Amino acid sequence: KGILVAVLDTGVDVDHVDLKGAVVESKDFTGSRSGSADVQGHGTHCAGIIGARQNDTGIVGAAPECRLLNLKCLGDSGSGSDIGIAAAIDYAVEK
């Protein structure tokens, strides 16, 4: 409960019904036109496995009362650079 979990992936759909209120901060390390938003879907899926809220809709994540950092280090195509991934890791450790 309350733990901060960094999701380093393709971004997170912060408006997803199962993730409402879960994402406390978003940052884009890819330079994407869509910013930290997830156009790929993979990051949102991973975030749901971790922190989907218990809301009688969809699924419940492994830590439904956690706080999520949305750190987009994989671009809209699903790939990323070692520099972007390392920067996201450093940022997560700092937080």
Image (tube, rainbow, N blue to C red):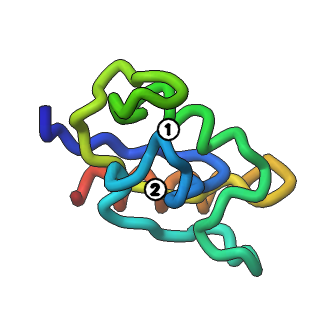
Q: Do the residues labelled 1 and 2 touch (CB within 8 Å)?
A: yes
Q: In this view, does 56 lie above or below 42?
A: above
Residue at 44% over, 66% down: 26
Amino acid type at image mark 1: Ala
Toward the right, the furthest residue is 77
Residue 47: % across, % down = 49, 38
Amino acid type at image mark 2: Asn
Residue at 41% over, 22% down: 60
The tally of labels here is 2
Which mark identifies residue 70?
A: 2
Which mark identifies residue 47?
A: 1
For label 2, the SS is strand
Residue 92: % across, % down = 33, 53
Hey, which quadrant is residue 6 in on the image?
top left
Residue at 60% over, 61% down: 84
**In this image, 93 relative to 43: left or right?**
left
Residue 18: % across, % down = 47, 40
Task: Locate the N terminus by quadrant.
Answer: top left
Residue at 47% over, 69% down: 27
Residue 50: % across, % down = 41, 29
Task: Give the alpha-carbon distance from disc 1 to disc 2, as whole Å.
Answer: 8 Å
